[in-house]
Image (cartoon, grey):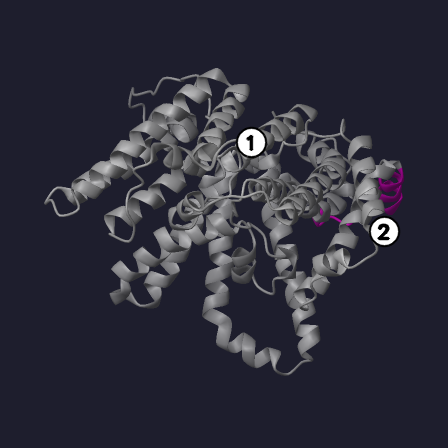
Amino acid sequence: MLFNSFHFLVFLTASSVAFYSVAERYKQLVIFLFSVVFIAAISSKLVIFTLIFTILNYILGIFLEKKLHSPYRLLIFRLSVMANAGLLVFFKYYGFLADNLNSLFGGFNAGLSFPHLNVLLPVGISYYTFQVIGYLVRINRAAGLAEHNFIHFANYLIFFPKFISGPIERSQRFFPQLNKKTTFVPDEISKGLRLFLLGMFKKVVIANNLAGPVVAAYDHINTFPQGAFVFVFIIQAIHLYCDFSGYTDMALGMARIFGIKLTDNFNRPFLACSVSEFWRRWHISLSSWCNDFVFLPFIIQYRRLGNVANVAGIFLTFFIIGVWHGANWTFVVLGLLQGVAISAEFASKRKRVMFAQKFNPQLVVLLSRIYTFLFFCFTLVFFNARNMSDAWYFISHLFVLPDLSQLSTVLIELPARVYMAVCFYLILFVFELYQENGADTGWLFQRMPRLVRWAGYYIMLAFIFFYSSAGDTFIYLKF
């Protein structure tokens, strides 16, 4: 049941009506029940697995809290984290590890082999596993208490707007929102609906229409016209951004309807002036989680090593971010490339600042943004390619001077909806530029005459309805 489907709109309407129709003490129960129904609509096996996962971690959290002053606290904590991480590794990486180990042992004639198991990846496991590990870490550090209300704890993990693709919520931010009284506030509901509409527009009208050439390029890489690789190289970034930020906007908008504010995953990432800044603006809930629970503990533990610890921590962090996205060597390379870029920025910061002072500041910002965007496009080759061979083929043919006649033919033959999607994104980008400079575009839009505002809503709805059959699933659903 995808967010951009008619069935989900009916589901969302029913859940919100039920939420505001019951007494305050039953509201979280309504969210829990509708979240269970949402997961069950995806898979009956998934709902069983998710409920067992939730119950076990609910018990583990309370047990760990009770043993905070026990000599076995650290053992209990480590076993709890290993159990959760082990489940994620088994479901997500067993096949990858088995194939690579079998190849390794086969090369040495070791006579060992791991069996192939038909293991399906439970939807959302990467997100709620990281959530629960963060929750357990806070209990172990005595920075937070275990949640004793099972319904509240379950909603922390399986709240349906964020279940399939995040954002990765922090317990200290999420739980307090469940304890406050939720009343029907029309202004908040309308803000949520506007955000949901914007997210659906980004997904259905922009991302789905750009998916065609991107998917065609990577699925048929050997027969795809080489002259069009440069075009795909650029639009793949727009495609991914509008797909994932579209999902995030929809999730944040829905949560707002239920009185919950989720973490925004994006902060105008294509206006970043460096790769390190980019990761403070892109997939914020994942990058900040890895910073707090991987990078900072690592450099604190090995601070005696100085800058070596910083660089090692950067590579470890982005290795985890890379493989978090999937069990493929391409994702390993994706993470390591980020590590190389950020380490280089870290090492050259003083010289870069001195060099930049010789030029116009606005020119420096512009060139820095272009460099960061192009680097991201380059790393997306490894994000989208099925294997390292395809990634190398794309890169090696990207820098071959294209046949201009072939390129013009390909661009002419592209459907008009592709160019329309690019144009809509450029309009969105202009709004982001104004926001970056401090303009509150949402407030300015709300100040417009009602006729203009509603005309805008209806135009967006018309485009969404027209292209509703064009789309694919959300990209980050598979992670």
Marked residue nearer the N-terminal end (2 or 1):
1
Q: Residue 292 occupies which quadrant of the picture? A: bottom left
The span picked out in magenta is: 398-412
Label 2's element?
helix
> Looking at the picture, which amino acid does disc 2 mark?
Val
Q: Residue at the front extreme?
A: 23
Residue positioned 21% across, 40% down in the render: 64
Name which residue lies at 81% across and 57% down.
Answer: 448
Q: Residue at x 72, y 30 (%)?
A: 471
Most foreground residue, 394 or 295: 295
Whether residue 405 appears in magenta in the rendering, the answer is: yes
Percent of width and height locating residue 119 = 43, 20
Secondary structure of residue under mark 1: helix
Residue 243 showing in the rendered view: yes
**Other residues around mark 1 within 10 Å, as few (<14) / some (14–19) / many (≥20):** few
Q: Quadrant of residue 470?
A: top right
Return the x and y of residue 227 as percentages of the image width and height. 79, 43
**Magenta span main SS:** helix
Q: Amino acid at mark 1?
A: Ser
Quadrant in the picture for the N terminus: top right
Q: Vertical placement of 285 versus 166: above or below?
A: below
Read off the residue under disc 1. 21
For the point 28% across and 39% down, the residue is 81
Q: CA distance from mark 2 to mark 1?
A: 33 Å
Question: Would residue 191 be found to the left or right of residue 133 on screen?
Answer: right
Query: Pointer 2: what residue?
Result: 452
Q: Residue furthest bottom?
A: 358
In the displayed structure image, the side of residue 350 where residue 364 appears, left or right: right
Q: Quadrant of residue 156?
A: top left
**Callouts 2 and 1 close, C-beta under 8 Å:** no
| Image location (x, y in percent) of residue 346 | 46, 67
> Which of 254 and 330 lies nearest the eye of the viewer?
254
